[in-house]
Amino acid sequence: MGTKLSQFQSKVLRSPRWVRWSVLAVIILLIAAGGFEIYQVNQTQVAAAATPALQTAVARQGDLTLEASGNGTLIADNEVNIGFQTSGTLTKLNVSVGDQVKAGDALAQLDDTSLQTALAQAKQALLELTSASAIATAQETVATDQQAVTNAQAALNNLTYQNTNQDAIQNAQSNLFLAQNNLSHAQKAYSQVPGDPSTDANKAIAYQNLYTAQLAYNSAEATYNLYTGKSNQTLVDKDTAVLALAKATLAEDQTLVAALTGGTVPANATGSGYDALRHE
């Protein structure tokens, strides 16, 4: 084999230059082709080694559980500050750090001795406000209020409508005419009696008749002027206010009676008596 290779080399060296270059080029191409073939084989082996092997399994239903572990500090998503609405001494604590609670749970308790005392006093006051005598007193007050409303309404009517009542005006005018006539007769009779009313009986009687007639005339004249004159606005305003106050007082006392006897109480009810009953 070695001899044949030496002979081949001797022939090549004795050959023309273009032959030698041609032989060299063929050798290079053969070497390159062999190297490329080796590279492709290696790449195929690498790719085969990198491709993971396929695994198969039977499909089934079940729970998928994921777990995570690690070290760190837990931070609450929401935090709430709680406290009592009133101050006092803490007597019981129902929870510890880390306990789970829900709405409505009693977390702690204060000393309620003073509150219990106040509650007992309020119950006693409520009994007194709702006693039989308290109800009777409230009903009596309502009756008095109703009479006050009637009187106030009559006074206002007399003041505002008196000059429009033609019958009353006519009656007052007739009384004034009679009073004036009686006064004239009394004046004439008094002037015709001699003597001094302090020493003479007849003169004294005539004077009394004259005095009485004068008073009757003055009263009749005042009544006639009242019915025919214009109402005083100040007096009208005063009587209107008195009537409004009487009606308001009646409404408040009626509310108290309704609350005490189980009646209907208006939604906007007011009044000191009702407020005292409601807050007990």
Image: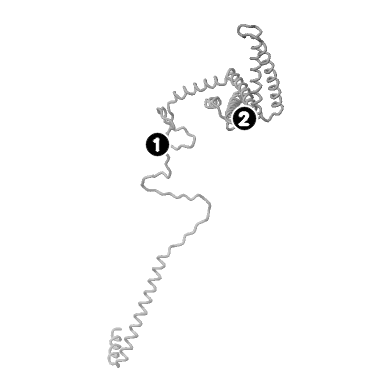
Q: Amino acid at mark 1?
A: Val
Mark nearest the camera among 2 and 1 is: 2
Q: Is residue 46 visible?
A: yes
Q: Give the structural element (helix, strand or loop) at label 2.
A: loop
Circle 2 crowding by C-alpha within 10 Å: few under 14, some 14–19, many from 20: some
Q: Is residue 251 visible?
A: no
Q: Give the structural element (helix, strand or loop) at label 1.
A: loop
The residue that mark 1 highlights is: 97
Q: Which mark is residue 213?
A: none
Q: Nearer the viewer, residue 168 or 255?
A: 168
Q: Amino acid at mark 2?
A: Ser
x%, y% of residue 27?
Answer: 33, 84
Q: Which residue occupies 46% across, 49% down?
A: 65
Quadrant in the picture for the N terminus: bottom left
Q: Is residue 243 left or right of residue 50?
A: right
Q: Nearer the viewer, residue 72 or 203?
A: 203
x%, y% of residue 19?
Answer: 32, 91
Q: Nearer the viewer, residue 80 or 119?
A: 119
The residue that mark 2 highlights is: 231
**Residue 92's image quarter?**
top left
CA gap between label 2 and label 1 equals: 82 Å
x%, y% of residue 124?
Answer: 52, 20
x%, y% of residue 89?
Answer: 40, 27
